[in-house]
């Protein structure tokens, strides 16, 4: 996979006044479009999500007072040089969730929902960390990989011939159960 050490990443930067996220090299044309997404309203977070996809990372993590980071092959890698301002993060997350979902988040202190861009889908989880919003975005691939791409044992493919039964796939988050 790509080398995503902080020394080789083109970092995501914040404006001098924390009002919006700025990504130095837009990459929104690198991905195929998700079917049925034609009226997508771009959000500030989209470029960070697209960068996550370009790196081949599974998750994007955003927390106030820390730089953004991604999970790549089970390891965390910094994605930014600067810490994210808590107010800016709250604004970006509220924009993504919308008013009704944001009110629900403020009441329950956690929120799970899905988000789709023209390039991909994401499972979004908001929570509170240190009194500030924290968010994790899990990339959901547009295509279903075949058994060979997954690198699973050949015995797994034989499960398809059974018409009844229960198969349990267990493991820690990010271990490839999906």
Image (spheres, rainbow, N blue to C red):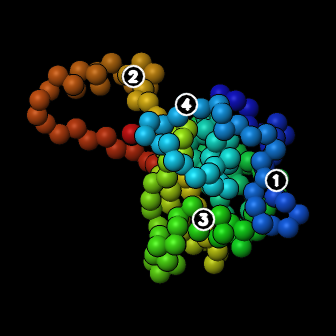
At horizontal 57% and vertical 72% (from top left) the residue drawn is 128
Residue 33 location (% of width, % of height): 52, 34
SS at badge 1: strand
As drawn, 48 above or below 4: below
At horizontal 76% and vertical 61% (from top left) the residue drawn is 20
In primary-sequence order, the first of circles 2 and 3 is 3
Badge 2 crowding class, 10 Å Cα cut-off, few under 14, some 14 to 19, many 20 or more, is few
Q: Which residue is mark 1?
A: 13
Residue 32: mark: 4
* Label pair 4/1, CB-CB below 8 angstroms: no
Residue 67 location (% of width, % of height): 75, 57
At horizontal 70% and vertical 37% (from top left) the residue drawn is 27
In primary-sequence order, the first of circles 1 and 3 is 1
Q: In this view of the protein, can residue 110 be seen by the observer?
A: no
SS at badge 2: loop
Disc 4 or disc 2, which is closer to the eye? Answer: 4
Separation of residues labelled 3 and 4 (CA atoms)? 24 Å
Residue 10 location (% of width, % of height): 81, 41
Badge 1 crowding class, 10 Å Cα cut-off, few under 14, some 14 to 19, many 20 or more, is some
Q: Quadrant of residue 92?
A: bottom right
Q: Which residue is mark 3?
A: 95
Nearest the viewer among 36 and 173 is 36
Disc 1 or disc 3, which is closer to the eye? Answer: 3
Q: Quadrant of residue 53?
A: top right
Separation of residues labelled 1 and 2 (CA atoms)? 37 Å
Separation of residues labelled 4 and 1 (CA atoms)? 26 Å
Residue 108 location (% of width, % of height): 45, 77
Q: Which residue is mark 2?
A: 146
* Label pair 1/3, CB-CB below 8 angstroms: no
């Amino acid at each position: 996979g790509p080398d995503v050490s902080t020394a080789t990443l083109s970092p995501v930067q914040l404006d001098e006044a924390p009002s919006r996220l700025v990504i130095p090299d837009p990459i929104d044309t690198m991905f195929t479009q998700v079917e049925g997404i034609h009226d997508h309203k771009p959000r500030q977070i989209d470029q960070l999500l697209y960068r996550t996809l370009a790196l081949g990372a599974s998750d994007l993590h955003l927390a106030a007072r820390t730089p953004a980071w991604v999970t790549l092959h089970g390891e965390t890698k910094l994605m930014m040089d600067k810490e994210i301002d808590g107010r800016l993060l709250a604004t970006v997350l509220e924009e993504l969730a919308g008013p009704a979902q944001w009110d629900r988040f403020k009441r329950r202190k956690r929120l799970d929902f899905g988000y789709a861009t023209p390039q991909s889908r994401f499972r979004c989880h908001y929570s509170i960390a240190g009194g500030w919003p924290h968010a994790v975005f899990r990339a959901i691939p547009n295509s279903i990989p075949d058994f060979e791409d997954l690198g699973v044992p050949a015995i797994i493919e034989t499960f398809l011939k059974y018409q009844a039964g229960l198969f349990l796939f267990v493991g820690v988050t990010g271990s490839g159960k999906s």
